[in-house]
Image (tube, helix red, strand yellow):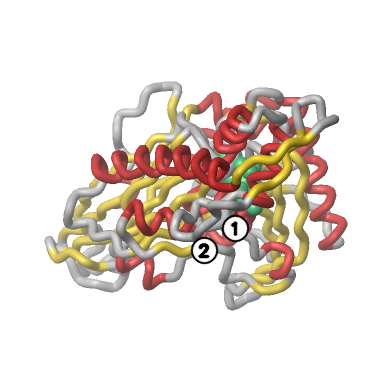
Amino acid sequence: MARSDVICGLDIGTTKTATVIASVAKDGSMDVTGFGVAPSFGLRKGVVTDLEETVKSVEAAIENAERMAGVHISDAFVGITGEHIKSLNSHGIVAVSGDDREVVPLDVKRVVDASTIISLPAERQLVHSLPREYLVDGQNGITDPIGMSAARLEVDTHIVTAGSSFVANVLKCVHRAGIEPRGVIFEPLAAGAAVLLPEERNAGVVLIDIGGGTSDIAVYWGGGVYHTWTVPVGGNIITNDIALGLKTSFSEAENIKQLYGTADVTTDVAEETFEVKALSGRTTRSAAKSFLRQIIVARMNEIFKIVRANLAENCPPEVMLAELVLTGGGAQLAGIDVLAADFFDLPARIGVPMHVGGLTDTIKHPAYAATVGLVLFGAKADGALQAPHRNGKSPWSRVSSWVSEIFG
Ligand SMILES: Nc1ncnc2c1ncn2[C@@H]1O[C@H](COP(=O)(O)OP(=O)(O)OP(=O)(O)O)[C@@H](O)[C@H]1O
Ligand SMILES: [Mg+2]
């Protein structure tokens, strides 16, 4: 970890911007010292559509967190998501360079870099190259090859790339809010860092971060990341369906979803009803909970179907999946774990942020999984683009110089 013992994560979502400030102890453990949240109106499906609104939201969230932590923040790890983000699995191979043929950190860096030599269109940029396993003279299953004797070093990596202009627009907002981007992190990887246990990552787990505008997927297998993807729909589409189905406003539909909504088809709600405000807000009428559940389950199953088809396409049979973890604000929907377990035929649980101390009451909430994960992932910077080594050769330095070209 570089630079300082205070680290900040900035999660600019479709419904809210959330910021976590954490202090990092010498042993790497972290305490959350500040947390700030502000409504976000400048994004659609993870993509900035209104710069000014987004800047305002970032400023407010940062200010709240700074006030709580009593520190001034000048840089942050920034989460990104959206359909423009693509991923693939790659392989790198190098000859071990030293005379004694012992793998040193430079060999590891060289082999990971070798795996990132892929043809990228000019408008795309590399965001992550995440080693999953190393092979030493053909022997697989190695997680840390440093110190081993070998002639040849290989690596399997998961590579994440993003549309450069989409990233630039997020970073432009961050910069205008007075924050220097320290690195960008694909949101489901951040969420995974916060809510998963090492055992789950080893056994094979699908993480789904259901936000307002997107549902981000990350598949971990054999300890590393095997697949990542973004579905451009989240909890807001359910609220829309409810608003249409019950002929009411979006905000009333959101209240109803949170108060009476459930995706659990195993419980009996046959006779139960609730009151719905008409669009005018002046009159109310009653509606059946079973109808509300029908709307929710239909849409949720549709999202799950899209995820299942994508998993079938991208995860071969040897990638055994033992569990499903649901997180993000959308995972607060009552009974969603029951529905998901039945749909995917896998045990399912709700993921809340772990692995940090400090103000945990405030942040132990599925909606803040990615926010907390940004500091956890950022601190390790495992394959994350690291902040501006000025004149360095890291992929980030390309982004950084190009970012400073934009900002002048
Ligand atoms: N109790 C609840 N029941 C059902 N859904 C809920 C509940 N609380 C929040 N949500 C839903 O969670 C969603 C917001 O989740 P989250 O805060 O993770 O989104 P975001 O990070 O702003 O968006 P994104 O990640 O898509 O950019 C909304 O669609 C909201 O309706
Ligand atoms: Mg989110």
Residue, x 35% and y 28% (percent of image)?
120
Is residue 30 or residue 352 the one in the foreground? Answer: 352
Task: Look at the picture and state if 248 lies above or below 27.
Answer: above
Residue 363 position within the rendered picture, expressed as x and y whole percent measured from the top left? 68, 62
Residue, x 60% and y 35% (percent of image)?
242
Residue type of the residue flagged with mark 1: Pro
With 406 as the anchor, is 133 left or right in this view?
left
Q: Is mark 1 within 8 Å of ligand 1?
A: yes
Crowdedness near tag 1: few (<14), some (14–19) or many (≥20) residues, C-alpha within 10 Å: many
Circle 2 is placed at which residue position? 195
Could you tell me which secondary element the residue under label 2 belongs to? helix
**Along the polypeptide, which appears first: circle 2 or circle 1?**
2
Is residue 9 or residue 353 the one in the foreground? Answer: 353
Residue 239 position within the rendered picture, expressed as x and y whole percent measured from the top left? 61, 37
Could you tell me which secondary element the residue under label 1 belongs to? helix
Circle 1 is placed at which residue position? 366
Name the quarter where the C terminus is drawn.
top right
Task: Look at the picture and state if 316 lies above or below 47.
Answer: below
With 273 as the anchor, is 108 left or right in this view?
left
- Find the distance from the CA under tag 2 to the CA under tag 1: 9 Å
Residue type of the residue flagged with mark 2: Val
Q: Quadrant of residue 376?
A: bottom right
Residue lying at the far bottom of the rendered structure:
27
Is residue 5 or residue 320 the one in the foreground? Answer: 320
Residue 39 position within the rendered picture, expressed as x and y whole percent measured from the top left? 76, 40
Residue, x 37% and y 72% (percent of image)?
199
Q: Quadrant of residue 20?
A: bottom right
